[in-house]
Image (cartoon, rainbow, N blue to C red):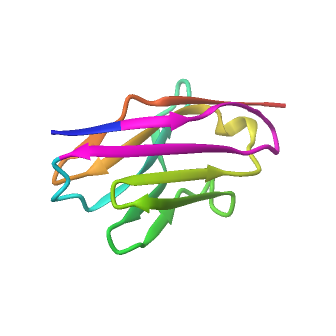
Amino acid sequence: QVQLVESGGGSAQAGGSLRLTCAASGSLGALSDMGWYRQALGKGRELVAMLNRYGETAYGNAVQGRFTISSESRSTVHLQMHMLRPEDTAVYFCYAAVGRTVWGQGTQVTVSL
């Protein structure tokens, strides 16, 4: 089994920064990529950022240029969020692709004016 532990998040003012961390443990032999999705109240889940085993990254259009995903190790990724906006308010879910998709429990990010 694969488990994901998310940390970070919380509240920030518009223009501020926050950092999320996701640590994976368990059977990671098939790990191909990790990243983050988010879901705002009343909206669907959208891609925030992903990082694959080759070091390639991809970002959602809404966060391009403001958020950066990086890896501390093969099983731990960070999401550095800068220039936060109120529309970034959402629950952020870490995921890991290990032949199937495993999701974290989600962490709330709230950005106020």
**Quarter of the N terminus within the rendering:** top left
For the point 23% across and 58% down, which residue is it? 31
Q: Is residue 100 depicted above or below 59 in this figure?
A: above
Residue at image coords 62%, 52%: 80
Number of marks in picture: 0
Front position in the image: 48 or 102? 102
Q: Say if residue 39 shows up in the picture.
A: no
Q: Is residue 73 magenta?
A: no
The location of residue 95, given as percent across then percent down, is 35, 45
Q: Position of residue 90 (x, y in %)?
A: 58, 32
**Residue drawn at (53%, 59%), measured in percent from left and top?**
69
- Quadrant location of the C terminus? top right
Inspect this view and state whether residue 102 appears. Answer: yes
Q: Nearer the viewer, residue 58 or 82?
A: 82
The front one of 105 and 64 is: 105
Residue 10 placement, left or right of 35: right
Residue 66 vertical placement versus 16 (above, below): below
**Position of 44 compared to 74: left or right?**
right
In the rendered image, the residue lying farthest to the top is: 41
Residue 78 point in image, percent of width and height: 51, 52
Q: Which residues are magenta?
A: 5-26
Q: Is residue 82 above or below residue 93?
A: below
Q: Is residue 49 left or right of residue 66?
A: left
Tell me the residue at 33%/38% (across/down): 4
x and y percent of residue 38 in the render? 50, 39
Is the magenta region chiefly helix, strand or loop?
strand
